Image (spheres, coloured by chain):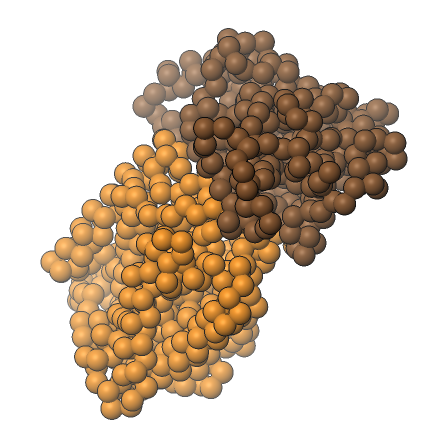
Chain colours: A brown, B orange
């Protein structure tokens, strides 16, 4: 992570000469490609398109660099483009923040399965908070209805839909991205479009992902989602408070996942799933702070993690009362 | 200048043909058009909208064909190894056919990868320097490197051989031999790396097995020679090009032995999974016998096993194998069997059940089948043209000399 964080205090990364030349080259290549594609037939149309703001934005977005390599100015421009796009497409004033990781913070999550009653409030709060596509419906959190007496995932039912929960003889196991310390998805990604931030959050640069699905294949917790179509968001339900690496509206054909609500948690707020949980089963916090609730739980309760034999070191623990 | 002349001549001669040739090309052109149309719809609507893929099954028939084609590409070395290492003169005549097949198969494999991407427009992100290639950590990055290198190597070697023959000489032997040695190593590595692409996933116990690499190589060295035998049988029946019986026999023996090994390795895999009956066996259980009432791949895989068994039984008996008719049938059986086994039979069960124990089945849609058909057609067109330019040059019908004679107006060359 040494080449990252343009917005960290005290770092003034000016545009380096090599970067400029690479970008110019790319722009030239792109222009050549565009010219070839357009051909001679519709020169007038092309000229009109070139002057169009949305076309220029799309072109600039296409040649945008990887998040960790962008200079501060480039990142600001990328953010401005996203905000303009939201204005154009949804007519909303989107705020795309870029809060850096907080020093001395490593996020972790603990979930009390004896308190979880399977209401799925976290699932739907997550959908709204993270601007997840509604049609088709995608969820970052999947709650498994498990048979008491066993942790066998193969006997779980994610589609449970009884009159009321909890059902007798069952317990509930919500699963989302475990933000592994040793994440197989990050290793798998051929373009480094997904990586682990210093505060432990595994993020995706949606503008860099090529949609190859290899991270989806690699994840042992089935936590990654693919945007099959351009996400459909009801305008009045769009969450305007977004983060560049988190819940900003995504495009079609890329991978997304739980980011521990990076737009909230990096500003000291709790993730939406914990806020929504009516039973208080969820505890999110800083693992490096010995006095945080999560640290106390890890010290005092009997906890377990899923699939520890895979050595992925998840930062998501389960415990019981 | 001569090189441009050579390219022009090679292309011209490859396009000169009778009615059957043009019927063949028209058929392939039509199926390519279907594929391009299907892909354009996929590009417009998005891959999950037009395919049978889901959140649960992330890879389908595209990656299945990709895995199979990497095997075909790698198997071109099955011709090269005996030709150059053991100096088998007869095989040397048909090395070019193998290389043409490697080039076509590699390009098809690359097209299948492109077809499976959610954002093919962003492919430049994987390039070193201007992109951000995750090398050496990502096995997919490794695959991109070795496949492109192998493709490049085969193109260079194919055209070097043709071009020097066109000029009436032979390639500079030490350099060419070095190229051959490197190609052998890279051929083995493209298939090993592709196996690692699957077996490196701890999340998918069905693939997470050390035997997957050897199984990949064994099946590649079965289906590759089988396809080459069919191509050679066609060539020797329809052209003046001499394909020695020894060549076919050598390839048939290679195919027989590797098919035996392949069946053995499959049995080993099945034993390990079924004897211990752990949760890791769920996928193979799904593939062979169905799992929790889901069984759409069961008839599919048993067809493959039956085809391979029939082929291996006959091939293992010398007199039967030497029967040309049986050999052709066995080749078709083997190719189909391996295509099922190292295609859908390999890819789909990896996703069933999901790491959370859920089961969602996968059936390819018309669009996906259309795209597959298109890619196979484009690859076959390429292979046809490459072979049709190679044969007249090898026969001496087309050379710089013949071109000069032709200019004098004394002789017209025809594609044999």
Does residue B396 appear anywhere in the picture? no
Q: Quadrant of residue A189?
A: top right
In the image, what residue occupies the spot 32% across and 23% down? Answer: A41
The residue most toward the front is A168
Q: Where in the figure is residue A320, as x and y percent of width and height?
A: 71, 40
Relative side of A92 to A183, left or right: left
Q: Where in the figure is residue B389, as x and y percent of width and height?
A: 29, 63
In the image, what residue occupies the spot 55% across and 33% down? Answer: A166
Does residue B315 appear anywhere in the picture? yes
Relative side of B118 to B24, left or right: right
Relative side of A187 to B183, left or right: right
How many labels, in total? 0
Name the quadrant of the C terminus of chain A: top right
Q: Nearer the viewer, residue A311 or B93?
A: A311
Q: Quadrant of residue A104?
A: top right
The residue most toward the right is A290
On screen, A320 above or below A93? below
Q: Quadrant of residue B100?
A: bottom left
On screen, B74 above or below B204? below
The residue most toward the bottom is B319
Relative side of A241 to B68, left or right: right
In the image, what residue occupies the spot 58% across and 9% down? Answer: A93
In the image, what residue occupies the spot 49% across and 28% down? Answer: A164
Q: Where in the figure is residue A72, as x and y percent of width and height?
A: 73, 23
The residue most toward the left is B19
Name the quadrant of the N terminus of chain A: top right
Q: Where in the figure is residue A301, as x and y percent of width and height?
A: 79, 41
């Amino acid at each position: 992570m040494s080449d990252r964080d343009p917005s960290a205090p005290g770092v003034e990364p000016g545009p380096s000469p090599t970067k400029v030349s690479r970008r110019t080259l790319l722009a030239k290549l792109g222009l050549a490609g565009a010219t070839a594609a357009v051909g001679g037939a519709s020169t007038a149309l092309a000229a009109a398109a070139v002057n169009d703001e949305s076309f220029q934005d799309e072109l600039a977005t296409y040649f945008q660099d990887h998040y960790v390599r962008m200079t501060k100015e480039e990142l600001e421009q990328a953010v401005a483009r996203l905000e303009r796009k939201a204005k154009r497409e949804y007519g909303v004033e989107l705020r795309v923040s870029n809060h850096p990781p907080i020093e001395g913070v490593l996020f972790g999550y603990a979930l009390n399965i004896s308190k979880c009653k399977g209401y799925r409030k976290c699932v739907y709060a997550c959908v709204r908070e993270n601007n997840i596509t509604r049609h088709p419906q995608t969820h970052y959190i999947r709650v498994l209805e498990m048979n008491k007496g066993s942790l066998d995932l193969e006997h779980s039912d994610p589609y449970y839909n009884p009159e009321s929960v909890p059902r007798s003889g069952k317990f509930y196991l919500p699963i989302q991205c475990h933000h592994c310390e040793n994440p197989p998805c990050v290793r798998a990604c051929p373009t480094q479009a997904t990586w682990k931030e210093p505060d432990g959050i595994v993020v995706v640069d949606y503008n860099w992902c090529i949609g190859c699905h290899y991270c989806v294949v690699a994840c042992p917790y089935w936590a990654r989602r693919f945007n099959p179509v351009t996400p459909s968001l009801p305008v009045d339900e769009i969450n305007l408070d977004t983060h560049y690496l988190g819940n900003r509206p995504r495009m079609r054909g890329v991978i997304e996942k739980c980011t521990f609500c990076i737009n909230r948690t990096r500003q000291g707020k709790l993730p939406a799933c914990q806020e929504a949980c009516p039973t208080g089963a969820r505890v999110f916090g800083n693992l490096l702070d010995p006095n945080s609730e999560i640290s106390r739980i890890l010290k005092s309760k009997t906890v377990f993690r899923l699939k520890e034999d895979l050595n992925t070191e998840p930062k998501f623990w389960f415990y019981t009362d | 200048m001569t090189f441009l002349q050579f390219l022009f001549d090679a292309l011209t001669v490859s396009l000169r043909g009778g009615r059957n040739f043009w019927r063949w090309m028209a058929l392939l052109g039509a199926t390519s058009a279907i594929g391009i149309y299907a892909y354009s719809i996929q590009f417009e609507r998005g891959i999950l909208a037009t395919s049978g893929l889901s959140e649960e099954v992330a890879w389908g028939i595209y990656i299945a064909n990709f895995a199979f084609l990497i095997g075909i590409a790698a198997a071109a070395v099955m011709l090269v190894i005996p030709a150059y290492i053991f100096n088998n003169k007869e095989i040397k005549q048909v090395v070019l056919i193998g290389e043409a097949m490697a080039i076509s198969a590699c390009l098809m494999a690359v097209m299948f990868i492109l077809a499976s991407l959610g954002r093919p427009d962003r492919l430049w992100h994987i390039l070193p320097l201007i992109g951000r290639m995750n090398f050496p950590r990502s096995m997919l990055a490794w695959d991109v490197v070795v496949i492109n290198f192998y493709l490049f190597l085969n193109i260079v070697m194919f055209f070097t051989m043709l071009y020097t023959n066109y000029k009436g000489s032979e390639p500079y032997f030490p350099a060419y031999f070095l190229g051959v040695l490197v190609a052998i190593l890279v051929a083995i590595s493209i298939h090993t790396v592709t196996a690692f692409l699957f077996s490196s996933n701890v999340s998918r116990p069905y693939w997470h097995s050390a035997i997957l690499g050897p199984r990949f190589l064994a099946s590649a060295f079965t289906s590759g020679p089988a396809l080459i035998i069919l191509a050679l049988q066609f060539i020797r029946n329809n052209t003046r090009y001499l394909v020695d019986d020894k060549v076919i026999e050598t390839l048939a023996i290679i195919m027989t032995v590797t098919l035996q090994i392949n069946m053995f390795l499959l049995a080993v895999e099945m034993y390990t999974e079924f004897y211990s009956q752990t949760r890791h066996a769920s996928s193979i259980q799904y593939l062979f016998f169905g799992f929790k009432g889901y069984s759409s791949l069961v008839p599919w895989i048993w067809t493959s096993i039956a085809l391979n068994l029939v082929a291996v039984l006959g091939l293992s008996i010398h007199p039967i194998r030497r029967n040309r008719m049986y050999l052709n049938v066995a080749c078709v059986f083997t190719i189909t069997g391996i295509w099922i086994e190292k295609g859908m039979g390999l890819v789909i069960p990896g996703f069933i059940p999901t790491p959370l124990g859920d089961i969602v089945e996968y059936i390819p849609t018309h669009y996906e089948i259309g795209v597959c058909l298109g890619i196979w057609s484009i690859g076959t067109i390429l292979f046809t043209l490459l072979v049709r330019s190679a044969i007249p040059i090898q026969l001496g019908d087309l050379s710089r000399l013949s071109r000069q004679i032709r200019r004098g107006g004394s002789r017209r060359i025809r594609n044999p």
